[in-house]
Amino acid sequence: MTAHNTATGGRDRRCPVVIVGGGLAGLALADRLHRAGVAFRLVEARSRLGGRIMALDTPQGRIDLGPSWFWPGQPRIARLIEDLGLRAFEQFSEGEICFEDTQGAVHRGMGFASMAGSFRVEGGLSSLVEGLAARLPPEHLTLSSPVRAVTQEGVLLADGGRVAGRHVVLALPPRLVAGMHFDPPLPDAAMQGLRAIPTWMAGHAKFVAVYDRPFWREAGLSGDAMSRHGPLAEIHDACGPDGRPAALFGFIGVPADLRAGQSAELRAAALAQLTRLFGPDAAAPTTTALQDWSAETATASWQDRTPPRSHPDYGLPGSLARLRDGRLHLAATETAPEMGGLMEGALASAERVAALILTDMARPR
């Protein structure tokens, strides 16, 4: 997502709200403020918008390299998809599930890897990012602009620019926030609280293989597989709603420290594994991609290289509430009041922070 790149537009600006982070939470917050008539400035370290939402572009369409699914009972993302004129479709799950044992032997009809009942977005989740960005004034979005410090007046950018605002919103994983420079410093309890919150999925890596057709479906396979042999621990069908683009993806089960510098070896081993599971057609993809989120310094801290064993009980600890008299906010999905870690949580967090800011802005000065 390189549109709206106004990297030099953030120098010495003042606005009511400064948003740091152009992922789903930051964009959703900007959208809410813009529709309420509140001016903002959003700064993003990457040269693209989307944060953990990222896609592989192929001639047939896009394939998600970050989050892929949402579920029934998540009204915010369902409403956003409808509001943006996008289309959701159900994850393909028809056919047998494969299971690979510790010796690499493949068994059909075993395992519990199916994502039946989940939904995806036609065109990939990057369509959400594009849709939100299109509703925002491009001159208010500043890309390729890491923040060097968070001050009492706003933020200081790495290029020397300053963006001042009454409210500063850090729409970033809390552990990344803990690595920022604050002037004056945050209380010790707040710093400890930030470091204690794991970044959801930041320690994981995703492998995608794209094909000219979904041949596994022709063989009566769902594309779902679990493995105790690896390197892919869990595999799913990643096709579009009509089978195009045709793709399989898997989560790499090798720990982050062991897979560092092993990209070529992991790709070869993953293709060999897909061939064992789904047959010889799997050995000849049109393209592959390996996205290691643990190596993304704009997503993962060193602590995130070891993922949590289960979904953390996310939320906003008391030590992180009302920072700097309620003018410094955290808006990552990990601080959401519900569905923390998920895209629904990112939207819930944006909703929470927007309500706080709009309430404050409505008070007489």
Image (tube, rainbow, N blue to C red):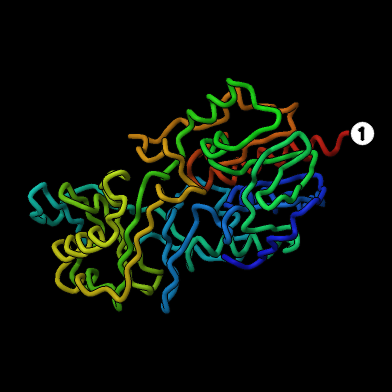
On the rendered structure, is 354 left or right of 348?
Answer: right
Does the image show residue 3? yes
| Residue 324 drawn above or below residue 269 | above
Residue 34 spot, x, y in % from top left? 76, 53
| Residue 351 drawn above or below residue 58 | above
Residue 310: quarter of image: top left
Residue drawn at the location 48% of the way across and 41% of the way down: 341
Residue 273: quarter of image: bottom left
Residue drawn at the location 75% of the way across and 62% of the way down: 139
Residue 6 spot, x, y in % from top left? 70, 63
The quadrant of the image that shows the N terminus is bottom right
Which residue has dot 1 on it?
Answer: 365
Label 1 residue SS: loop
Residue 238 spot, x, y in % from top left? 35, 63
On the rendered structure, is 317 left or right of 313?
Answer: right
**Which amino acid type corresponds to the residue marked 1 in the rendered image?**
Arg
The quadrant of the image that shows the C terminus is top right
